[in-house]
Amino acid sequence: MPRGRPKKQNDNEPSTQNTAANVGYEAQLWQMADALRGSMDAAEYKHVVLGLIFLKYISDAFEEKHAVLEAERAQGADPEDPDEYRAENIFWVPPEARWPHLKAQAKQSTIGQLVDDAMTGIERDNSVLKGVLPKDYARQALDKTRLGQLIDLISNIKVGDAEARTKDVLGRIYEYFLSQFASAEGKKGGEFYTPRCVVRLLVEMIEPYRGRVYDPCCGSSGMFVQSMEFVHAHANGNGNGGKAKTDLSIYGQESNYTTWRLAKMNLALRGIDGQIAQGDTFHNDRHPDLKADFILANPPFNISDWGGERLRDDKRWQYGIPPVSNANFAWVQHIVHHLAPTGVAGFVLANGSMSSNQSGEGEIRKALIEAGLVDCMVALPGQLFYATQIPVCLWFLARDRRNHKFRDRRGEVLFIDARKLGSMADRTHRELTAEDIARIAGMYHLWRGEKEVPPEAVGGLTVYEDIPGFCKAAEIDNIRKHGHVLTPGRYVGAEGQEDDGETFEEKMKRLTETLREQQAEAEKLDAAIAANMQELGYGQ
């Protein structure tokens, strides 16, 4: 086994790690909630369920604080003072929106209108949620009996009290439901959801400790949630010298209005304050002057209807005008445009972006490489995404590759071929394991010159070295020889084979003897078949 290569789980074995496919009660809750969907389309039902879970979460947190204040009335506390809650970053929940009130009315025919009134009241009293919550529970098409049953089901779980927040119960449920809806909706649903393992890999690689984080097509805000989780996970040092602090500013944009609402709810649930704008990023850039320290994105792949014909002279196209027929290199250049002078970007694109020469894409890619912006390329395994079966890759760009934090990497690009990594989470979807993510990110960090990469994550290495079949640091002249194609398989070579200690002469002698034995066995079988055919009257 080549150095640095951990034992890979058999692709046919079920994953035993705590993945999005086997997290326990979340799956049971999903099965019960999905059974209540009836004939409703998953895209509609998504907002019904996630809206109720959000309502339960903020009501749990409110009720817990309400009980504390009630017990302190004698000391002058007022349980009905909104400022008591806002002072501790707890949403104020007006009486008509409190979960016990809704639960008590769950079997009434008016429950849909009561939920709508609850959502309206919460938006009215919490400006950050204005225009975000779903308010169409009273519509005729929504079965009120099923809605009441769903409320009863959600009533049985605590998602917003202190203990549940410590365990991130809500986060796990919300994440699991988002992934299940993405799966249920297929291509359409996957547009708002990037698999958690892919987001985690992007975040682990670019390490957004502090500064401005931007996602120009933020979907349901998974990149931001994972960035904050990364900071919290590293807050006590954990190998980074204690440099992590929750000092991130969040900026995002999402064109789809209902997905934008999901994004806002997803951040609000976790108390993350972000400037998330709604609108078309290409034609109505809502953060035009932003220069971000970190950019994370999963743009829609290969879109042809992005309105490129109206943007021929845009200032963002510094490295070439992207084709009207494909927005891939419009996204790349939009990202470059918004990078700070020392900024780093990691994003997902279709594999074609690494080698396409159509409509000037090859010239744009060449210009990006020659400008020294391309830092690392990662080829991912298939079956990771719900939205597409198109093979995908990760691009990592860096504005300043002298990068005073790391070593001088100018004139060099790291290629990682991760296509053989991952394990099957179910029959149709693959997930990168925690070990896979640590290995890929670890090799990138070693190559950048970081000193605190856990050796156990990278096969015991303490300094970077090429691993045939997995990673290669290629010089710019080598990339030029390949026509500025960025496909990792072109550079990493074949996986090394273990030396079994057998000499060439010994091996040839053994293989020759085996061949002769097989030939003799084949002659016996041919004779037996001929005899049988003779008996059946089909001999020559």
Image (cartoon, grey):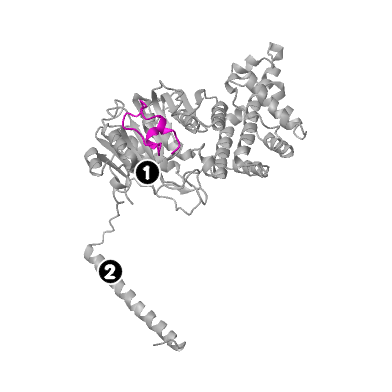
Name the residue at the top extreme: 76
Question: Magenta stretch?
Answer: 304-331
Amino acid at circle 2? Arg
* Residue marked by disc 1: 352
* Residue marked by disc 2: 510
Q: Does 476 sit left or right of 235 as displayed?
A: left
Is disc 2 placed on a helix, strand or loop? Answer: helix
Residue 409 appears in the picture as rendered? no
Identify whether 317 is placed above or below 436.
above
Tell me the distance, in whole angstroms, between the alpha carbons under discs 2 and 1: 45 Å
Crowd rating for badge 2 (residues with CA inside 10 Å; few <14, some 14–19, many 20+):
few
Between 274 and 24, the one lying in front of the other is 274
Between 167 and 521, the one lying in front of the other is 521
Q: Does 154 sit left or right of 333 as displayed?
A: right
Picture coordinates of residue 231, whole percent (x, y)? 45, 28
Is disc 1 placed on a helix, strand or loop? Answer: helix
Residue 84, by quadrant, is: top right
In the image, is residue 174 part of the stretch drawn in magenta? no
Q: Does 337 sit left or right of 264 as displayed?
A: left
Between 196 and 480, the one lying in front of the other is 480
Residue 219 appears in the picture as rendered? yes
Q: Which mark is residue 344?
A: none
Picture coordinates of residue 152, whole percent (x, y)? 71, 36
